[in-house]
Every structure is written in C-alpha cells, then in structure tokens.
Image (tube, grey):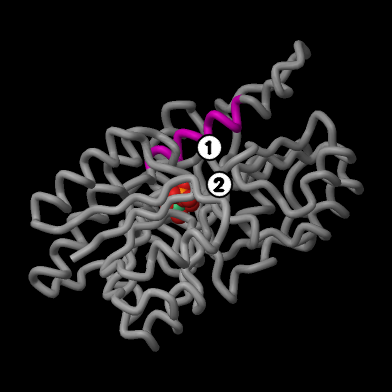
C-alpha cells in the first residue's frame, strides 16, 4: 500500500518524520510530494497512491480520476472544502478530516493578529487594549472554543453564535450564546470568524451584517476567504473609516484592500493559522493513524462523505 503526502505548504520536518514512522510501522510505503507548484505534479504523484494525506491541497474530480488506486483521502486539518466530496463518493473514495488537531494553533494566531490590529500595526501611535472588549465568536467549534479559552486570559467579554451548537454547551464555558449572527455583530467590538466554507456560508459575511458593528469594530478571519463578500466588505470599509479587517487568508482583492485601507487592513502572505510544529504533528500523525485504521481495520471514524 502506498501513502502519499501531497502538501503544497509542507508540514514541519518533525511531523513528516512522525507520519513516516506510523505509515512504515504499519508496513506501508510513504511517498512525499511537497511544495509542488503545478497540478500536473499532483496528477502524476496520485497515479499509484492508495491513500493521500493533504492540507489545503485541491482534490477535485480530475485528481480523483487520475488516482485509479485511491481508497482514502485524509485532510490533515479541519476544513475539507478543498475536496470534491461528490466526486470522491462517485469514485468510492473515503474522505476524512482530523478535527481539533490544529485548532489551538489557529486560535493563538487570532490573538497574534488582534494585538497587532489594536496596537495600530505597531506604528507608534496609541492603540487600545483587548481587556474589557466584547469578542464575538462566530461558530463555536474546536477553534471557537480555544479562542474563548484564550480570550478569558485577556479579560474579554465573550459572546458566540453557532447555528448548530446548543446554547447550553456554549454557556457552560462562560460565553454568552446569542440567537443570531445579526445580534452577535451588533453587540461585539471584535468578531472572530470560525465558520466553514459551505454553499450556505459563502459570501455570507456581508455589508448588512457588518454595518451594525460598534464604532472601531474589527473583523478577524482565520476561517476561509470565501465566506466574505469582498465587494461589500470594501464598500463597508469605504463608508466606515473606523473599521479594520485582519485576515489569515488573503482576499482575492488583496491589492485593492491594500491600496484603499492602509493602516486598517492586514493579511498574512500565506495562511499561517495551522503552521506550527505542534499542529503539524497533531494533524499529520492523526491523518496517518486514520489511514492505517481504515486500510487495516476498515475504521471510518471522521469520514465526512457518508
Ligand atoms: C484547517 O482547515 O485545518 C485550517 O484552515 C488549516 O489549513 P492548512 O492545513 O491549509 O494550513
């Protein structure tokens, strides 16, 4: 059995070593395709792979068609919007993710970005503090929970909205659960996005939602760029010179944001949320173990294409 690690943005070496140990320990072969720049390289590498570990790498119908021997794809991470689930199901390929394994890393980056933003991108002027500010957590999954835990240390007032998480689960963490996204954005000085990119959420963060945020509002996005309605965010930021947008996922209109909103817009050059040795080890090794469990025992825990 051949397991391919296909990562355009590679894991830390220590994580790759751990993956290798798991895969070879199970008697399988490991192949590595890191830092590839061309889809043709991926199409070639998947030809004889029985299993693939990926990150944000795109597994579409063409890749699945080329991977004739493929049985399983594991997205080492949370969001699997980069995998064509219908095509995978049609090809009889199991798709899994590794929920929770990189969530602390992403949550820590939220605060890295936030401190940078409230201190005016370290330009020497007086900024503000996070203590006492109202933080809205939009979606209370693994990352949202870690954001809440860290925010308590900063002395922030916490609110959350999650259409799928029961209110009592949120409130037992000392976080006020509100009834709608509209309410969350109206109340909170800062909103941190943790929704997945789905047909329902794409473009859902729009002017209507953001326009009621209090003066000096900040939107921080460590989720997906697709959930933002970029045209409407640009319009809103033109109307509201007090509004800041900071993101770990560069918008399609990055050049425009950079040109128009100097001093209140920042994007990391490459998605950095899960780029820690710890997160790479946790997610990468979990992915390797899930592949071994699936190929040896048929274990389908964490399957996302039912
Ligand atoms: C995830 O969905 O797990 C995060 O967005 C991290 O993605 P990455 O592995 O591409 O950094």
Magenta region, residue range: 104-115
Q: Nearer the viewer, residue 245 or 18?
A: 18
Which residue position is annotated with label 2? Answer: 222
Quadrant for residue 118, please give it.
top right
Mark 2 residue's CB less than 8 Å from ligand 1: yes
Name the residue rendered at 31%, 48% in the picture. 283
Q: Secondary structure at mark 2?
A: loop
Q: Is residue 46 above or below residue 239?
A: below
Q: Residue furthest bottom?
A: 90
Does residue 285 appear to the left or right of 232 in the view shown?
Answer: left
Query: At which x and y percent is residue 146?
Result: 39, 42
Q: Is residue 134 above or below residue 185?
A: above
Q: Nearer the viewer, residue 278 or 40?
A: 40
Q: Are marks 2 and 1 in contact (CB under 8 Å)?
A: yes
Mark 1 residue's CB less than 8 Å from ligand 1: no
Residue 176 shows up from this direction: no
Query: At which x and y percent is residue 148?
Result: 43, 41
Name the residue rendered at 76%, 37% in the picture. 265
Quadrant for residue 130, please give it.
top right
Q: Residue furthest top?
A: 124
Q: Is residue 275 above or below residue 91?
A: above
């Amino acid at each position: 059995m051949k397991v391919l690690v296909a990562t355009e943005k590679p894991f830390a070496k220590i994580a790759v070593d751990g993956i290798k140990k798991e895969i070879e320990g199970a008697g399988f072969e490991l192949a590595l395709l890191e830092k590839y720049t061309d889809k043709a390289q991926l199409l070639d590498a998947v030809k004889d792979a029985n299993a693939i570990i990926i990150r944000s790498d795109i597994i579409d119908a063409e890749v699945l068609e080329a991977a004739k021997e493929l049985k399983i794809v594991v997205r080492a991470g949370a969001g699997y919007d980069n995998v064509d689930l219908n095509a995978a199901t049609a090809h009889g390929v199991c798709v899994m993710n590794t929920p929770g394994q990189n969530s602390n890393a992403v949550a820590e980056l939220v605060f890295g970005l936030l401190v940078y933003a409230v201190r005016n991108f370290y330009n020497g002027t007086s900024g503000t503090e996070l203590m006492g500010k109202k933080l809205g957590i939009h979606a209370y999954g693994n990352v949202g929970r870690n954001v809440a835990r860290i925010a308590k240390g900063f002395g922030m007032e916490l609110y959350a909205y999650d259409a799928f998480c029961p209110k009592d689960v949120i409130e037992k963490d000392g976080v006020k659960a509100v009834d709608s996204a509209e309410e969350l954005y109206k109340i909170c000085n800062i909103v941190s996005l943790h929704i997945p990119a789905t047909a329902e959420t794409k473009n859902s963060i729009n002017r209507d939602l953001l326009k009621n945020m209090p003066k000096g509002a900040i939107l921080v996005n460590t989720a997906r760029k697709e959930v933002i309605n970029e045209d409407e965010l640009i319009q809103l930021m033109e109307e509201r010179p007090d509004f800041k947008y900071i993101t770990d996922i560069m918008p399609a209109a990055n050049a425009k944001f950079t040109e128009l909103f100097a001093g209140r817009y920042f994007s990391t050059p490459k998605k950095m949320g899960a780029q820690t040795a710890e997160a790479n080890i946790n997610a990468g090794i979990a992915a390797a173990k899930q592949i071994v469990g699936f190929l040896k025992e048929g274990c389908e825990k964490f399957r996302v294409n039912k």
